[in-house]
Image: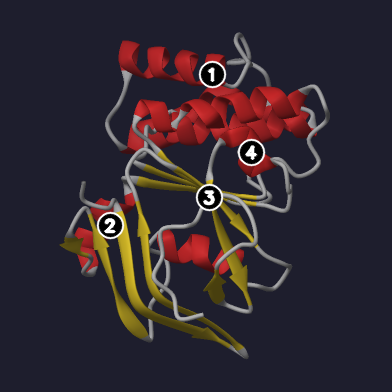
Amino acid sequence: MEPLLTLSDILFRRDDFSLEIDTLELEPAHCYLLRGPNGSGKSTLLHLLALLLVLERGQLKYSGRLVGGGAERQQLRRQITLVEQSPYLFDTSVYRNLAFGLRLRDVNGDLQRRRIAQALQAVGLEGFEQRRAAKLSGGESRRVALARALVLRPQLLLLDEPTAGLDRETLPIFERCLAELPGQGTTVVIAGHDADQPRRLAGTILELDRGRLVRPTGGPTPLLKETI
């Protein structure tokens, strides 16, 4: 099966930090857990996977096609959704937050309403359409941010520390939703520090150290070819 996204001979530099990856392949409908200490480059790698960075060197292929620039790259970005560590919600209703990206994709009317209802149900927030986003709890806000990503039905979903600070009641709901996504055809990459999460989500570990991918000491072997 063709990898969803392939990175080859990558070099990205910003100030005194550099991210260097020989080869990394992300398979379709798979879950990856991105691990590493603070400053190792997890957020940078997520932005690279989201096609948001200009490389100094390297090649990216999406479903076997070389990623170019301009309109082609913009079109590919519609297949990828990045949820930042501190996601921003518009100060309006939950429904309008979820509808924003759909409207940009010309999804309106009954189809829009059904997809929003399905996404909120997936994160355990049925009936929250008219709640004001500014009045939500921290855990509810994170689930709305995830629902806003799910409603777009991306092929590749990237999440930066999505479960950090979640309470014990919210965490299982959040992780259950994430665990179901590969079965629905979505590739998921989750950056975080929870050592038990790879086991709970049955994901492949990607370990970063000072901008380099390394083989982890435990867990499934990542799909990479890296000079160790």
Please tell me the numbered disc located at residue 122.
1
Circle 2 sits on which residue? Answer: 74
Name the amino acid type tagged 2: Gln
User: Mark 3 to mark 1: distance in Å?
Assistant: 27 Å
Distance from Cα at disc 4 to Cα at disc 3? 10 Å
Which residue type carries mark 1? Answer: Ala
Query: Under tag 1, what secondary structure?
Result: helix
Q: Is mark 3 on a helix, strand or loop?
A: loop
In the image, is residue 73 above or below residue 179? below
The earlier-in-sequence mark between 3 and 2 is 2
- Residue matched to label 3: 220
Looking at the image, is mark 4 or mark 1 earlier in the sequence?
1
**Residue 70 vs residue 58: left or right?**
left
Alpha-carbon distance for marks 4 and 1? 21 Å
Whether the residues at callouts 4 and 1 have beta carbons within 8 Å, the answer is no
- How far is the residue under mark 3 from the one under mark 2? 33 Å
Task: Give the image location of residue 224, x and y in percent.
Answer: 41, 65
Contact? badges 1 and 2 (CB < 8 Å): no
Residue 93 position within the rendered picture, expressed as x and y whole percent measured from the top left: 61, 24
Local secondary structure at mark 2: helix
Residue 153 spot, x, y in % from top left: 37, 32
> Which residue position is annotated with label 4?
199
